[in-house]
Image (cartoon, helix red, strand yellow):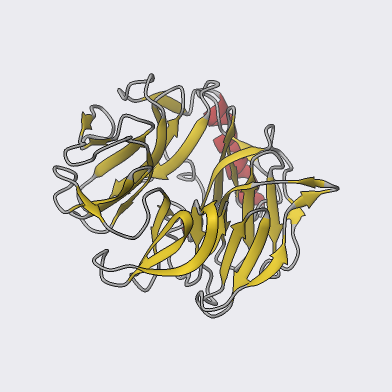
Amino acid sequence: MKLIIFLLLFLSSLIYSQSLWESTSFPDSIPVLSLAFDSSSNIIYAGTNTHGIYKSTNDGMTWIEINNGISGYKIIRDLLVINSQKVFAATENGLYKSTNQGVLWESINVGTNAFGYLTTSPKGDIFTGTWGGIYRSTDEGENWEKIFNTGQDLVQSISFDSKCTIYSHISGDIYRSFDYGLSWQRIGDLRTGSTHHSINSGVVTNNDNILFGTYDGGIFFSSDYGSTFEPKNTGLNYLGISELLVDEGDHISVITFPKGYYTSIDEADKWNSFGDGLGNDEPMTLTTDSKGYFYLGSYYGGIYRSKFTLFRFLPKERTKKYYKHPNTVTMDSILIKK
């Protein structure tokens, strides 16, 4: 424990002596809504608000626009890489697929138009959240089945725990399914006093603890599969949560708005700030590459890259690969945020 504390103090002093983040060449005038990394080809994909999709093959040094085949409003809410060639894009105008690293996109007919989220389960199934429900594909996007009807509400976040339990936040309520979406039960909502908090992101740790990030109430934590929640905001300067990530070692990263990047190594009991170098740019999305460097997409400041990996000075057994939420392996059920 003393070694870990010493290393954290050393890391903090190093980071605060220099800026952790640096801007890439991505235009800061283009709002970034989603990021995805393909480890097999070292490609970073960026989804934007009205400007479509960009990619970089050289660690963010240069970016090229790749919108051939995408029509209508090019609002890219999420991106999902299946393999070195196949990429999916959830847009305001439909779901798209590319089988050649974004050179050409084709529209996929799922039965609805506006999409908010994409992910895969450890079983290899693809899940997408839409305005109206959750759809699942068991054949890499060729066919889709609707497994949850949310009316007119947008599903924006999907995660998995080890017991195949599905958690869903719809119209202010959290729902849970123990049978992979065949049936659902309401388990409540997130409140501090009489104030209701809308959920903006969510993760499940390897111990099956649930963390929800909200628009204005910070982070809520559950250790009993969603039956009860408690706030976990010690160390956070801002309570608007844009995105949460968790790795195999249960290191948690969170980005907050209007600015801020924080980490926790104790399942959110304490948050440590490592946002030096970020402006008031409204952080929106976060991912990492295969080397462990972080990429942060913002609404007003383009895309930032960390100058070094955040956990590189921690003991080896605590330095694990990050996965863009919610693609954390060993998890097998779904958590959804509204």
Q: Position of residue 128 (x, y in %)?
A: 40, 58
Residue 178 figure quarter: bottom right
Q: Position of residue 37 (x, y in %)?
A: 31, 46
Residue with the most extreme right position: 193
Name the residue: 69% across, 38% down: 216
In the image, 317 versus 91, the foreground residue is 91
Q: Let me know if residue 306 appears in the view.
A: no
Q: Position of residue 76 (x, y in %)?
A: 36, 40
Indicate left or right for 255 with 39 as reference: right
Task: Identify whether 98 is placed above or below 300.
Answer: below
Indicate left or right for 87 with 92 as reference: left
In the image, 227 versus 111, the foreground residue is 111
Q: Position of residue 155 (x, y in %)?
A: 51, 54
Name the residue: 55% across, 77% down: 163
Task: Identify whether 191 is placed above or below 261.
Answer: below
In the image, 205 versus 212, the foreground residue is 212
Q: Let me know if residue 99 appears in the view.
A: yes
Name the residue: 46% across, 53% down: 325
